[in-house]
Amino acid sequence: MDAVIESPAEIEQRLAQAQNRELMNRDEALLVLMDLGIDQYFEDPVPDLVNALHEEVDDPDSPTLWETYNAATRALTHYTEDIPDYELDAGYEAAASLLENEFAEPPEPGQLGRHAVERRADHLIENPGEEDEYWDGERDSIRELIEAHEVSR
């Protein structure tokens, strides 16, 4: 709908920006998708989202916001069952936040990734032993991402 209302040139510019803005790695892209709440639509969210990321991301060491958005929409379209379209619409809207923020431009991937990593790290710290890792080695990945983002803990 926005594309009809807005200038096609603006939409193309926004998509080009999203294609050039990269997250740190595929693990961070997964954490961003989980942080956006995309996981709530799947029976097995981590394998489904990892599979979608594998299909959509060309370089696992630098997934773009565009590729991460495409992974989210792929997963919502192909890997969900028995979820009404009106509920999935909220998932598509959450995924769209990878392409447009409140200023009608793609978000900064560093801030987006840092926020998702901090929230997940805080959750794991606050629930030691209670919270399962999303994937084997997640804690190590989070430590590496925290260092990369220069977050003090």
Image (tube, grey):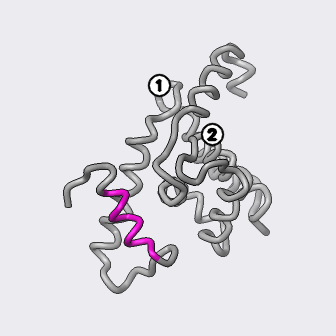
Magenta stretch: residue 141 in it? Answer: yes
Farthest residue toward the left?
152
91 is higher (above) or lower (below) than 66: below
Q: Residue 25, position in %: x, y?
A: 50, 53
Which quadrant of the view contains residue 51?
A: bottom right
Which disc number belongs to residue 103?
1
Distance CA(mark 1)–CA(mark 2): 17 Å
Left or right: where 136 falls relative to 88: left
Residue at 66 percent of width and 22 percent of height? 11
Q: Nearer the viewer, residue 2 or 34?
A: 34
Q: Quadrant of the C terminus?
A: bottom left
Q: Residue 131, position in %: x, y?
A: 40, 80
Residue under label 2, please give it.
Answer: 66
Q: Residues within 10 Å of mark 2 (few under 14, many from 20)?
A: many
Residue at 35 percent of width and 61 percent of height? 144
Q: Nearer the viewer, residue 2 or 29?
A: 29
Left or right: where 108 falls relative to 125: right
Q: Residue 49, position in %: x, y?
A: 64, 62
Query: Pointers 1 and 2 in contact (CB under 8 A)?
Result: no
Q: Amino acid at mark 1?
A: Phe
142 is higher (above) or lower (below) than 127: above
Q: Quadrant of the N terminus?
A: top right
Q: Secondary structure at mark 1?
A: loop
Left or right: where 129 falls relative to 106: left
Q: Secondary structure at mark 2?
A: helix
| Total numbered circles | 2
User: Which residues are drawn in magenta?
Assistant: 137-146
Residue at 49 percent of width and 78 percent of height? 136
Which quadrant of the view contains residue 37?
A: bottom right
Q: Amino acid at mark 2?
A: Trp
Magenta stretch: residue 83 in it? Answer: no
Q: Nearer the viewer, mark 1 or mark 2?
A: 2
